[in-house]
Image: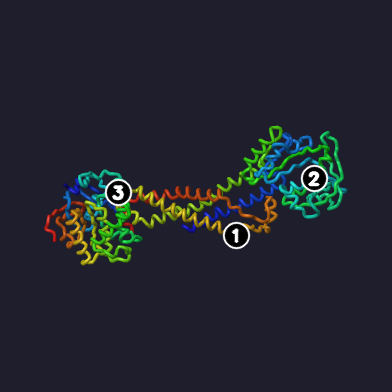
Amino acid sequence: MLAAIVIGVWAMIFMTALMRGMVDDMVKDGISVLPGHVQIHHPDFRDDPTISNVVAPPDGQLLEVLGRPEVVAWATRVRVPAVISSERDTRGVTLVGIEPVRERGISFVADDISEGRFLESRDDRGLVVGRKLVEKLETGLGKRVVIMSQDPENEIADRGFRIVGIFDSKLAQYEEGYVFGGEGAIQDLLGVGDAISEVAILGTDYRDVTGLHRMVADAAGPDVEVLPWNEIDTYLGSMLAVMDGFVVVWIVVVFLALSFGLVNTLVMAVFERVREIGLMLALGMTPRNILSQILAESILLLIIGLAIGNLAAWAAIEPLKDGIDVSIVGEGMEYFGAASVLYPALYLKDVVLANVIVIVLGFFASLSPAWRASRYDPVRAITKV
Amino acid sequence: MKSVRCIDLCKTYRQGEIEVTGLDHVNLEIEEGGFVCLSAPSGGGKTTLLNAIGGLDTPDSGEIWLAGNRVDNLSKGELAKMRLHQIGFVFQAYNLIPVLTARENVEFVMEVQGVPAADRRTRSLEILEEVGLAGLEDRRPAQMSGGQQQRVAVARAIASRPALVLADEPTANLDSQSADQLMELFVELNKNHGTTFVIATHDQRVMGYAKRVIRMLDGKIVGDEQREAA
């Protein structure tokens, strides 16, 4: 019985840690690709992400807030739909003008340059392009491409850029769909002065951005829209919410499997102790005493099982902190936006949830055998062979 | 004052397809401090009567009074409390809890009563000494002879200082020497503490210790004999 509880608890916590690790990885990757934890935009930018919907760069109170310790990093960007043309092909992309130094703290591009270099300054006139896009355009590092977009007057704005870096991403859509240039260079191209499309802000914990969001929103004022990452990328946001629900379902399902063993074992334990229970009743223990005693014994069993199961789960997860290589199913993982190395993530709230569910449901599962024991006829129980 | 009073007790029960008469209009009174043997052949109704008096079984009809209180109409919980505080049981098969030591078995009833641990320990050691088991208090039942186990059972029965001890065939599993020693212990406890003993038996030598022998047959009392105890 103890072994069943231990294995059940271990499975609950270990598998939850693996799933959490996978989702964490997906969300962190998703956040690092562009959204940050909180973003500031023009109120119409999400509906119409063009150069017409820009905001002024941070200043005054907002700049002071962005310097607080709650803000790990922040960066401004100019972001517009554009067309990129090589001598062989033309593609629609999102052109993102970035401040390279600030962007390094937030997004993936700097770390994922696989060929060439990253942008060196906000006035860098080079372009960083995804590998898949380079392949589609049949171009390459050092080649020139033409970027074409619209300025605020709805006039064509175009310019030739040289590809100075090629980046890889876990997600093909980013490799194909995003092109990065220096923020100043893109502002020049579009003729928007120092206006920007967004400010991306990174806090300390993506799971708890409420405080950061409120702080930034208060400082940014009512003329702009300030959104947390889970409202910007609703797919990632809902995935995290689904995961929280899934963890509860998973723990309950494992417990239900476990509860059959628990009830069966308790019934057998009670059945084996019929004479002893009958004797206790005969000597003066009340049915309520018997009920309490059987429940206390099963709760004690659950607590011991939980303690060992928690330790076993911790002992199994700790050595895997450096990651589990799942590259054998790497393509499948990539399809879901997850990496080929899985890092189990053990959260206190998941451990507490598993323990509480086991204790509470275990208590209810124990009620039936305990109730049955308390109803024994002492004369028949004592004489039972 | 009457320790036990039974009025027109009737009890039938089923054994398979057959309905058996356990008690057939039994009327009985036992004085406080009595030392009574219920004698009957197997199936004669002595255990049924003992169980009814002890609140382990309920009669189909009739009344049971213990120390002036009617008990046949009590709930299961109330009957359990009555057994805990007023009655000591000695069973034929000893019925000790195998995982507990002699002392722990004796302490069990006091523990359920809520007696503090230190008092339990002191009293259990005193009682074990009284029943002749000094030095064996840390032994488990499996490490003791039948006679010693039955003495532990007696110690447990009197640990809560009950007014009434009900013993069902207490010597049935003992050799004659152990049986005599046990009966002498019962007599001594009856004399020293004034505890009422009601012993179900069909052993003539056990009946020899009794001041009164009540004979039963087919659930009826067919004889009630006062006698000089051995």
At a point 70% along the width and 48% down the height, the residue shown is A32
Mark 3 or mark 1, which is nearer to you?
1
**Quick one: label 1, few (<14), some, or many (20+) residues within 10 Å?**
few
Residue A321 x/y as whole percent: 62, 57
Is B142 above or below relative to B221? below
**Quick one: label 3, few (<14), some, or many (20+) residues within 10 Å?**
many
Q: CA distance from mark 2 to mark 3?
A: 87 Å
At a point 41% along the width and 51% down the height, the residue shown is A296
**Residue most extreme to the right:** A87
Q: What amino acid type is highlighted by mark number 1?
A: Pro
Is B136 above or below relative to A367? below
Q: CA distance from mark 3 to mark 1?
A: 55 Å
At a point 85% along the width and 39% down the height, the residue shown is A157
Quarter of image, res A78: top right
Residue B158 x/y as whole percent: 25, 55
- Asked if badges 3 and 1 are on one and the same chain, I answer no
> What subunit carries mark 2?
A
Image disc number at residue B80: 3
Reading the image, the residue beneath label 1 is A319
Closest to the observer: B76 or B148?
B148
Image disc number at residue A122: 2
> What subunit carries mark 3?
B
